[in-house]
Amino acid sequence: MGKVKVTLVKSTIGCVKEQKANVEALGLRKLNSTRIHEDNETLRGKISKVAHLVKVEVVE
């Protein structure tokens, strides 16, 4: 599979504990922090839980 670049674009202040844990599991700590991950089903599940907080781009 390919790779995806995940960027935190909205703060986790006021979010549910589960959403904060998912953002941290993605490796994102501060606003505008970016991580590149291998694209798989587990990652897509985490991203879907916090889709309103992150921006996802496909990297070739």
Image: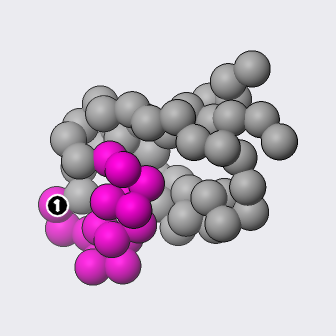
Horizontal relation, residue 59 to residue 35: left or right? right
Q: Is 4 situated above or below 14?
A: above
Queried whether the magenta region covers residue 25, the answer comes back as: yes
Which quadrant of the figure has residue 26? bottom left
* Residue located 62% across and 30% down the image: 57
Residue type pointed to by label 1: Ile
Element assignment for label 1: loop
Residue at 56% x, 57% y is: 47
Location of mark 1 (residue): 13
Looking at the rendering, which quadrant does residue 45 occupy?
A: bottom right
Relative image position of residue 14 (x, y in whole percent):
18, 68
Question: Foreground: 51 or 29?
Answer: 29
Residue 11: x and y in percent read 23, 49
- The stretch of residues the image draws in magenta is 13-28
Q: Residue furthest top?
A: 60
Q: Quadrant of the N terminus?
A: top right
- The residue that appears at 36% across and 41% down in the rendered structure is 8
Q: Where is residue 38 in the image (x, y as percent from the top left)?
A: 66, 44
Where is residue 41 drawn, in percent x and y?
74, 63
Residue 40 in sight? yes
